[in-house]
Image (cartoon, rainbow, N blue to C red):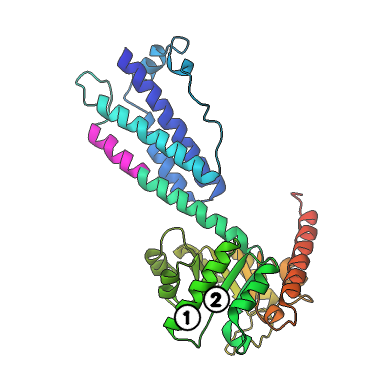
Amino acid sequence: MEVIRLIDANLDRIGEGLRVLEDISRFILDDSELCGQIKTLRHELVKGTPGLQTSLVLARRVGDDVGPHLEIPLDNQREDLQAVVIANARRVQESLRVIEEFAKLPFTPLGVSPTKLEQSRFTIYELEQRLVTRLLRQEKVKGLAGLYAILDISSLQEQDPITAAYEIIQGGVTTLQLRDKQSTRAELLRLAQHLRELCHQNGVVFLINDYVDVALAAQADGVHLGQRDLPVSEVRRLLPLDKVIGCSVTTVSQAQQAQVEGADYIAVGAIYPTKSKKDFKLVGIEGLIDVSKSTSLPVIAIGGANLSNVEEIMKAGATGIAAISAILSAADRKSATQQLIARIEQIRKSIESLSPES
């Protein structure tokens, strides 16, 4: 009877912990595959053998259990969602280990082998890592909402990129992408390392355009890919799991493919004619509307954005707006950045106030 009580308590912990992880993957990450995997594992582990559930319930002695009366510090605070995942994954792992040991006894009424329990424990280790890294990426992607600044070296015309980046960051931008088509890889890496430090000191997400190797070497927060670069699926395999991947698209099919392959956000453009890119394809507002409706990923609108047209862009479904000339060509980059951010936020609040959910 004592062993059955022990099994019951640990099966309860497993079910409770897995349900927390399942709900995080379902409601917070919106990841159907991960949610399904955790749900299946939960059902497999807690269902037990026929008749076992009744025995477990009858064996409970809640009032006589000495565990709840032990004087230990209350575990009633979590720093963030990652801490919630780690705490509940640990809860499941420890309970699995207990049941695994008692499943080795000849009289244990469990319908699962110790080997299966061990395999489940290692599965939880892997799921824990996936959940934590997905949450870390999700936190970085939140910085895309609003103004997405692109530090295009060719647009600076020999001006110091570090100074320009500092001015933009002082203006309040939360995401900075480095785009440099003219420097050598060695030169680009040195610049990227300086910018990474500047961005991380100020809580800004730092991305590299095109070059996966430079993003890895500079320890950037992620990389932004074009249609001529490596496929998103391959880059996802190469990069650490907590790194962000963005992808430029011009069509609905490209947007859907990027999402399937594991992109964290997409950039759509050019929305308007732009001098920042010579070979741009004009997508227009209608194209932005179509792409925004076709994907659940954050959508960054790029190409010709400025104070006069950000309202039209935001109302077309953009999550954020990428800016190059509008801030790099300004006499006061800090002020230009602040003005764009304020305008975008004003429009966002106006759109939200008109939403049926508000």
Q: What's the CA distance linking mark 1 and mark 2?
A: 9 Å
**Count of numbered circles in the view:** 2
State the mark number for residue 226: none
Would you say residue 14 sits in the magenta stretch? no
> Residue 17, position in %: x, y?
45, 34
- Which secondary structure, mark 1? helix
Please state the extent of the stretch shown in magenta in the rendering. Answer: 114-124
Q: Earlier in the sequence, mark 1 or mark 2?
A: 2
Q: Which residue is mark 1?
A: 188
Residue at left offset 63%, top offset 77%? 163
**Considering depth in this image, is 189 or 282 the residue closer to the camera?**
189
Amino acid, disc 1: Leu
Give the crowd class for mark 2: few <14, some 14-19, many >=20 residues within 10 Å. many
Q: Which residue is mark 2?
A: 178
Residue at left offset 44%, top offset 69%? 232
Can you say whether 246 is above or below 108 in the image? below
Main SS, magenta residues: helix
**Considering depth in this image, is 69 or 49 the residue closer to the camera?**
69
> Residue 64, position in %: x, y?
44, 9
Please state which of the two labelled residues, at mark 1 or mark 2, is closer to the viewer. Answer: 1
